[in-house]
Image: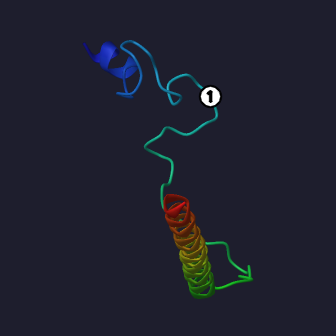
Amino acid sequence: MQASKDLHQDPGLGPGLAGPATTGSAQPAPADRSTEFVAVEGGKESTSAEALLVSAYVVMWAVLFAFLWFGFRRQQRLDKRLVDLEKALGAAERR
């Protein structure tokens, strides 16, 4: 039973398959690999996260206002056209 357990160390692998640690490869076992984030030392950020966040909000608000403005202008043109059509229909009915 011990040999079967040794062959199947990684539950993500199928039954009887060995993980990288038991195959003799140079890669470390998944449990041995570090999952901790390590920041790069000495690097300088070109733009702060706050500036990027504010820029994103400004762009989104500008897109929203442009969408509303163009919709408002289109609605005005449709209203004017509807009034013109109602006048033309009224003039045609009087004839």
Left/right of residue 75 with respect to residue 26 in the rendered view: left
Give the quadrant of residue 53. bottom right
Q: Is residue 6 left or right of residue 48?
A: left
x then y, percent, for residue 80: 57, 74
**Quarter placement of the N terminus:** top left
Per the image, the residue denoted by label 1 is 25
Residue 38: tell me if it is visible. no
Dividing the picture into quarters, in which one does residue 52 lie?
bottom right
In the rendered image, residue 92, in percent from the top left (x then y), is placed at: 55, 59
**Three-letter amino acid code at disc 1?**
Ser
52 or 36: nearer the viewer: 52
Q: How many marks?
A: 1
In the shown orientation, is residue 22 left or right of residue 40? left
Q: Nearer the viewer, residue 72 or 89?
A: 89
Residue at image point 59% right, 25% down: 24
| Nearer to us in this view, 77 or 69 | 77
Q: Could you say which is closer to the camera, residue 18 or residue 3? A: 18
Crowd rating for badge 1 (residues with CA inside 10 Å; few <14, some 14–19, many 20+): few
Considering only vertical position in the picture, is 7 above or below 84?
Answer: above
> x%, y% of residue 54?
57, 86
Query: Which residue is depicted at the point 64% across and 34% down?
Result: 26
Quarter containing the C terminus? bottom right
Q: How is the image coloured?
A: rainbow
Residue depicted at x 50% and y 54%: 34
Inspect this view and state whether residue 27 appears: yes
| Residue occupying the point 46% across, 20% down | 18
Residue furthest out toward the front: 95
